[in-house]
Image (cartoon, rainbow, N blue to C red):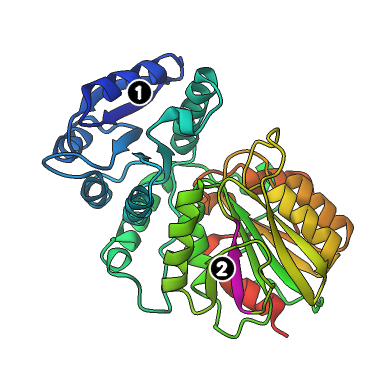
Amino acid sequence: MAIRVLVVDDSSFFRRRVSEILNQDAMMTVIDTAANGQEAIEKTRLLRPDVITMDIEMPVLDGISSVRAIMKDTPTPVIMFSSLTHSGAQATLDALDAGAMDFLPKRFEDIARSKEEAITLLQQRVKAIARRPRRPRPVTPVRSPSPTAAKSGLSTAAERLSALRQKNTPQPAAVESGLPSRTSVPRRSGKPYQLLAIGTSTGGPVALQNVLTKLPANFPYPIVLIQHMPGTFTTAFAARLNSLCNIQVKEAVDGDPVQPGHAYLAPGGRQMLFEGRAGATRLRIVDGNDKVNYKPCVDITFASAAKTYGGKVLAVVLTGMGADGREGARLLKAQGATIWAQDEATCVVYGMPQAVAKAGLASESLPLPLIGEAIINEMNS
């Protein structure tokens, strides 16, 4: 059965363009379009689409307000279109807080090297969130959130969409990966650590917020975060995480000393590496090879961590499309590092964690609400 899509944008040209791209794929059909957020709410209630593509800036009712209303009334997977500007990044993060699952730049040339690649990417992203239409569990901030985050309604959106979709969706995590999902925090292994490394993609902003807000200010190790995201977005996202978390979060800069209780977010469009030895390490931020699909790339940072920290790393792979992180996790595992994967039931897209689990690299498959607590328990010195 074809995935039924509602396309929402105030530009008739863009509505037509997106509709043509999606209708090229036999697995999808655009059932209708809407010119503003209010129309989107009404047509979602009437037509019950499988996925919505949503613009942010629209007359009558903007995209963020529309997403919030849809998640309250008729929870549906939403992918946002946004501009690659600072204000566009802020608005997109607000939309993700409101319940949207994913985002893409509105200018397709910003995300692909060719028209064909852009078409394929849009089609893949829509199919991915339709296939795994779940939201992570709600975030519980431990520091006063920003006004936009506080009023986002994230908990309600997450709970309602999760309840709507999960009741009719099988939970095959144990079958797919061979690794059953945990229902409680795993027993502490007693291994020594020097670094926490977390990689993620689609669904990652909300997942990272969930995990990091649980960590205490005196967390004893440095943390590196690799989230597939454009450069203007990582700047805004690091600032938002820092406003919500007890630990210090910043966008990584070349030469940053790696310090305990600090989290360093890899800047979009570049690669993050380690230089020096464990205990006296600095970050290197480089442009990297143009042939690498992801900038930042989880595999590259994980591989560098394996070289610098050996087996004294806890690496966690969260929700995301594709298999980025698997080969880096393989190198870490060979050094004796511990690898965890987010479980299928709480992923927006069970791609990256599944790749790690199916390769036999992950020792634990954990639901998102347990990961922060499990990290504290495992790395408690």
Circle 1 residues within 10 Å: few <14, some 14–19, many ≥20: some
Does residue 88 appear left or right of residue 260 in this picture? left
In x, y percent, where is residue 82? 35, 41
Main secondary-structure element of the magenta-colored stretch = strand
Query: Mark on residue 370?
Result: 2
What amino acid type should be assigned to the residue bearing mark 2?
Leu
In depth, the one of 110 and 320 nearer the eye is 110
Query: Mark on residue 127?
Result: none
Residue 263 falls inside the magenta stretch: yes
Q: Is residue 280 above or below residue 310?
A: below
Alpha-carbon neighbours of circle 2 within 10 Å: few (<14), some, or many (≥20)? some
Q: Residue furthest front?
A: 255
From the image, which quarter does the C terminus lie in? bottom right
In the rendered image of this protein, does residue 22 appear above or below residue 182? above
Give residue 141's position: percent from left, percent from top.
41, 73
Residue at left offset 35%, top offset 23%: 18
Mark 2 residue element: helix
Dot 1 or dot 2: first in sequence order is 1
Q: Nearer the viewer, mark 1 or mark 2?
A: 1
In this rendering, would 175 be left or right of 151?
A: right
Boundaries of the magenta span = 261-266
Element at badge 1? helix
Q: Residue 15 appears in which quarter of the rendering?
A: top left
Asked whether residue 193 appears in the rendered view, the answer is no
Q: Residue 205, percent across and down?
A: 48, 56
Residue 110 seen in render: yes
Vertical placement of 89 versus 219: above or below? Answer: above
Vertically, is 148 above or below 102?
A: below
Residue drawn at point x = 58 percent, y = 74 percent: 373
Residue underneath mark 1 = 18
Callout 1 amino acid: Val
